[in-house]
Amino acid sequence: MDLGDFFKEFYDIDLGVNADVNFLNLERGAVVFDTVVNLNYGLINSLVLNIIPAESKFGFIANRKGGDRRKIVYPLKAANYFFNSIRHRSQNRINIADIFCLFSPRFYPTRREILGKTAFTFDKFNKKKKCNNGIKRIIFAVGASSIKRQLDSEELAEIIRLIHADYPDFEIILVGLKEESDYAKRIEDDIDFHILNIVGKTSLPEVIEILKTGDIMVSPDTGLLQIASFIGLKIAAIFLGNANIYETGPYMEGSYVISPIMDCYPCFEHLKCEFNYECKKRIKAKDVFNVVKLILSVGGEDFSLRDLEKGFEENRFNLYRMSGNTITFTPTYILSPVSVFKSKIDKTELVSEIFKFEWFRTLSDKKINVGYNGIINYLTEYFILDLDIVKLVNDDIMFIKNIAVDALKIRINEISDNFILFLKGLAVNYPHLSLLLSYFINEIQFGIDMNDKNYIESSFVDIVGFLENAHITLNKIGSNRI
């Protein structure tokens, strides 16, 4: 029996693939793992997780026929948050790197640890012009494994021309995977001066050594971007399509990310774009070039933000800076994107920004101290607050909180499927609170499935405390006690 037939026997799904492959030798009983973790929300991954023999399974798993095929197995609250944050992407404000840290038995802030040096030389790649390791370098990661996330080659070539015109002494290097060679060749052919194109010609350790020699990286959301940020390379990132700055923004303080302003952004990776990739048209070569100039000017020449601000005012794009100083978490260090240009805040964004602090308090086993005034100072520095919206959000939060308080007064064993359905209805009617409500529903359901009354009660206590803290913050904003 091949893998496709196996799935069709046990699940209401046709994989639509030729599964006549040796897939991890997953014949029943052939391999038994201690622990298996699925960090992907995709259904196929979840089905694979379900058939792998293991003592412990973490993450997203699908049940068999007749049941809820999209069940979350989450012995940790962070796993519950992670999978619900994927379903409600617009409300998540926690970088995936930090979420994965919360998966561990204790919260460990991310560490910058990279592979050791390799015996690498540029000579085999560069016959026209010998590279000098002391020269200024701008490195372009050309691909993003998805047409949604990368600029057209003509636009990237124009960025390179603009950089070369202002910084003729800078060396420009293209890096990427072998599959991106044709894309890189189109860029190279579109330019009438020398650049070093080594796309598809290096191993990963060699690329890391190249990144260590760079001054700036210009990149879409890709693995090389994350490696460069951990090395400490200055970053000018272009986030398009399904790339979400709050999820996978470069984890390096001082990095900049430019992203389009569109209702459909960020989208989902596997959904067809219905707008002819309009998000790419929002960001011009000149905009990315100005971000590079901004980075080069820090601590040096004067640079006016006016040209970039004009793009923001035209509702084309926003510009973010990765900052570790805007939020004071004790005793942890958390990196968060902040908008370079102050903007009006709507209900969903206000909820998401305030809840960001409460999520860390709820999901971490460490006592994380975040002062109310610190949160308010952060909000007033980076956003234009509308007190009417503040009041509306505060009223909604108190309504949900009172429901949870009332539920605590009844016997926990009387929590029924009807109550779960009621909460699901609230998530529909209060979409700006849907991430919190979906998380809460899963926590309660997990307690019911485990027949653990203490877990259910603890879940209610968590949400009451969560919402009370948010209520206090909003009250302070509303009363102008900042």
Image (cartoon, rainbow, N blue to C red):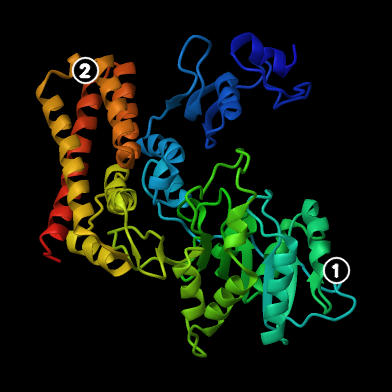
User: SS of the residue at dot 1?
Assistant: helix
- In the picture, residue 239 is in which quadrant? bottom right
Give the class, few, some or many, for how many residues have Cα within 10 Å of label 2's Cα (few <14, many ≥20).
some
Residue 49: percent from the left, percent from the top?
A: 56, 25
- The image shows residue 232 at horizontal and vertical percentages of 55, 69
Considering every residue shown, the one lying at the far right of the view is: 127
Q: Which residue is mark 2?
A: 415
Q: Residue at x 68, y 79 (%)?
A: 162
| Comes first in the chain, label 2 or label 1 | 1
User: Is 275 placed above or below 48 here?
Assistant: below
Q: Residues within 10 Å of mark 1 (few under 14, many from 20)?
A: few
Position of the C terminus, as image quadrant, is bottom left
Along the line of sight, which residue is nearer the eye, 173 or 286? Answer: 286
Task: Specify the amino acid type for callout 1.
Answer: Asp
On-image quarter of the N terminus: top right
Q: Nearer the viewer, residue 182 or 266?
A: 266
Task: Between label 2 and label 1, give the one nearer the viewer.
Answer: 1
Q: Measured from the top left, where is residue 284 in percent x and y? A: 62, 68
- Rounded to the nearest whole Å, what is the CA distance between mark 2 and mark 1? 66 Å
Residue 432 lies in quadrant: top left
Residue at 38% over, 65% down = 324
- Type of residue at label 2? Ile
Q: Is residue 193 visible?
A: yes
The residue located at (79%, 62%) in the rendering is 184
Residue at numbered disc 1: 189
Nearest the eye: 396 or 19:
396
Mark 2 near mark 1, Cβ–Cβ under 8 Å? Answer: no
Relative side of 392 to 140, left or right = left
Dot 2 falls on a residue whose secondary structure is loop
